[in-house]
Amino acid sequence: MKDAAKLSAYFVAVVLVGAILAPLLFWSAQLLAAHGILTFLTHYNFESFFHRALLITALALLWPLLRSLHLCSFRDLQLQKNPHGMRDVVAGLVLSGLPLACAGIVLILAKVFLLKTAIPWVSIAAIMGAAAVVPLIEETFFRGLILGILLRDLRAPLATFLTSFLFAILHFLKAPDRTSELVAWYSGFKSIAHSFGQFANPIMVLAAFTTLFLLGWILADARLRTRSLWLPIGLHSGWIFISGMVGKMTKRPEILPWLGRNLLIGLIPLGLALVSWVLMFGWLRYENRKRA
């Protein structure tokens, strides 16, 4: 359990250091703005600085973690070179995006979702950028690094469970805006406490956390079956792209637990994720037969 213990220590350090760093970042931004420098920073609340502090800390402590684990290559993380990487990316896009797109069209035809009169082209361009960049970062971190480290100590099912739980909880936990109006040195720790307040709402846990956990499990399963990150990157990208496109082009009611604020939250998205998983099984089985 040596590597898993180091990974646990890494996350504890990220949370603690990030919580201490967040007020310092916030106060520094306010000081700069007061002197007419980077005045746009005053538009961001403390929670934004808290999230940035966690990201900065995670990146700063990543190199010491990798050094302590003596990782020399992707093979140490049970990853192999994939000569069919682009094919897997395209397949992932289709397998995840097609069920979401079909559901979006049905909801629009049923007038549950209403099309906006103007298309927000700038927002759509931002979604395309996020669909290209976010999966590369998150899959490298969660399914590449985290799952790979856990696989060195644990059996695949347990490693998959822990990685999926971490993926879900990091996306699920979000403190309400304006949680810390008066910022003190302990405000980062208050943000952590407020973030866990969502677990008091069973509907949100059922609608959001459960779906995120399943998505994380599917992505981990794709990585394990292909011993590569390309298929999970494609799946992740398809979910972000179609969900974002539908979100920007329509007005949507929030019908929890069936549908949340986007097509990735709720029991309907959970069912759509299961459809993508079944399609993934079928596609991988077809590809394995073709190679045999």
Image: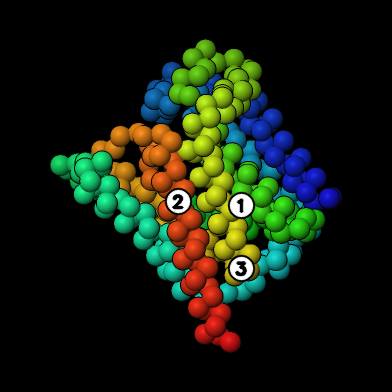
Q: Residue 74's spot in the image, x, y percent?
A: 68, 66
Q: Residue furthest top?
A: 182
- Residue at the image point whose x is 32% and y is 43% from the top: 247
- How much space separates mark 2 and mark 1, taking CA atoms? 23 Å
Give how far apart the Cα atoms at labels 1 and 3 are: 16 Å
Q: Is residue 204 above or below residue 264?
A: above
| C-beta proximity under 8 Å, tags 1 and 3 | no
Q: Pointer 2: residues within 10 angstroms few (<14), some, or many (20+)? A: some
Amino acid type of disc 3? Arg
Mark 1 — residue? 142
Residue 37 image offset from top left, x and y in percent = 42, 26
Q: Which image quarter is the C terminus in?
A: bottom right
Q: Nearer the viewer, residue 77 or 204?
A: 204
- Which mark identifies residue 225? 3
Residue with the mark numbered 2? 271
Q: In what element is the residue under mark 3?
A: helix
Q: Position of residue 174 (x, y in %)?
A: 52, 31
Label 1 amino acid? Answer: Phe
Q: Is residue 92 above or below residue 150?
A: below
Q: Secondary structure at mark 2?
A: helix
